[in-house]
Image: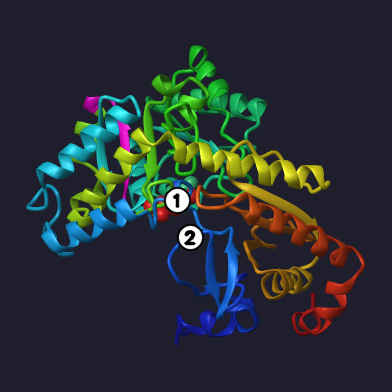
Amino acid sequence: MTRDLFEKIYKNKGPLGKWAEVAEGYFVFPKLEGPISNRMKFQGKEVITWSINDYLGLANHPEVRKVDAEAGVAYGSAYPMGARMMSGHTDLHEQLQDELAEFVSKEASYLLNFGYQGMVSTIDALVSKDDVIVYDVDAHACIIDGVRLHLGKRFTYKHNDLDSIEKNLQRATKMAKASGGGILLISEGVFGMRGEQGRLKEIVALKKKYNFRFFVDDAHGFGTLGKTGAGAGEEQGVQDDIDVYFATFAKSMASTGAFIAADQQIIDYLKYNLRSQMFAKSLQMQLVAGALKRLDMLRTMPELKEKLWENVNALQGGLKERGFDIGTTQSCVTPVYLKGSVPEAMALVKDLRENHGIFCSIVVYPVIPKGLILLRMIPTATHTLQDVEETLTAFSAIRERLENGTYKRLSAAVAAAFGD
Ligand SMILES: Cc1ncc(COP(=O)(O)O)c(C=O)c1O
């Protein structure tokens, strides 16, 4: 008899799942309630929310809510039925694609139902088995999963490390010459955990020495970086040299959906070869109409991005002034690194939420190295300077308690239960 497939699942919930019993509902799968904004409710109490990617504050903007509601009335949530290629294509989808392409200075764009699947599928469609992929070792899961579908060679380079990028381009060049394929290099515009921008400018400069195509996932850069908000490519002055540009609607656009943008010929190819779009229902009309409104606001309301950056600068500046380690962020993503165990991190977050009314994401081992606690904060345009001040005061208090061993004592029971 073979072993029951579920046996391993019954025994082991996985590296994060093992915390479910003590963490679920509070540290993971928490329920934030009330309208999406700078302050929401968590377990009945008001908290300042630093964990929502609503960078420009559009999620609950009255003009956005109005268009979303009107589109809901006009189209319902079913329209259009079918995949784009078969029966789910509309003028509004085309209009949004044209406007997005123009906004990010590309010839054409194509809509994706979700960023994650869209990235996976785009990587899959761009390469064939003779091609070689070169990508950052810290890449988002959707890039890793896209690369997993690739039947040919792939190389990771050390995170944002130019020597490593070049070394791997040399290896890839050798491989591609032997196989007769080409090279796809993939970076993020902004790395979502630590907030560093990808080395887009330096990577583009390498195009003079190596023959590769450059694909950028700019989920966190779109709407937040660059003079017009067109993202990390615009910020670094290399948008034209990005061959395929990706952004999701899940962050600055405060919605669902995503798009890729590139030369017309590439988009024409992708629209006939992106399996995640060919074999899935079209992006629903309410989301398309809503995205048109959001894009219009990105273009015409620079004050949203200005307010966002006022908050980012106040928060990051204040944390640095108080001696917090915020790593090497070059974006709105604001990481705060502290030293401590997982149980200590739990006690600390509980203190932040219960006694200071601060809600931010917590990242621990195995996502980051053992012994480190990462509190990840996402400032938005809806935050106020008062929110920033209260948060800075709270952070000073929790650091003191972390250093004087309060959390170690509080978390002893949890630590004992998990052998930490
Ligand atoms: C870097 C990056 N790429 C892709 C995605 C996936 O986008 P979506 O939420 O639209 O699936 C995310 C998260 O939203 C992300 O942070």
The residue closer to the viewer here, 240 or 370, is 240
Identity of the residue drawn at 52% across and 23% down: 236
The residue closer to the viewer here, 344 or 16, is 344
Identity of the residue drawn at 22% across and 53% down: 283
Tag 1 near tag 2, CB within 8 Å: yes
Image quarter of the C terminus: bottom right
Where is 326 relative to 160, above or below? below
In the rendered structure, the answer to whether residue 107 lies left or right of residue 318 reads left
Real-space Cα distance between discs 1 and 2? 7 Å
In the rendered structure, the answer to whether residue 32 lies left or right of residue 102 reads right
Whole-percent x and y of residue 317?
72, 41
Name the kind of residue labelled 2 in the image: Ser
First-in-chain label (1 vs 2): 2
Name the kind of residue labelled 1 in the image: Gly
Determine crowd level at label 2: few under 14, some 14-19, many 20+ residues with C-alpha closer than 10 A.
many
- The answer to whether residue 256 is seen in the rendering is no
Whole-percent x and y of residue 63?
30, 51
Whole-percent x and y of residue 111?
25, 44
Circle 1 sits on which residue? 57
Point out the residue furthest to the bottom here: 1
Question: Residue 174: within the magenta?
Answer: no
Whole-percent x and y of residue 175?
48, 28
Determine crowd level at label 1: few under 14, some 14-19, many 20+ residues with C-alpha closer than 10 A.
many
Image quarter of the N terminus: bottom left
State which quadrant residue 202 falls in.
top right
In the rendered structure, the answer to whether residue 36 lies left or right of residue 63 reads right
Local SS, label 1 = loop
Identity of the residue drawn at 23% across and 61% down: 69
Circle 2 sits on which residue? 37
Which stretch appears magenta?
Answer: 257-265
Point out the residue furthest to the front here: 386
Identity of the residue drawn at 64% across and 26% down: 162
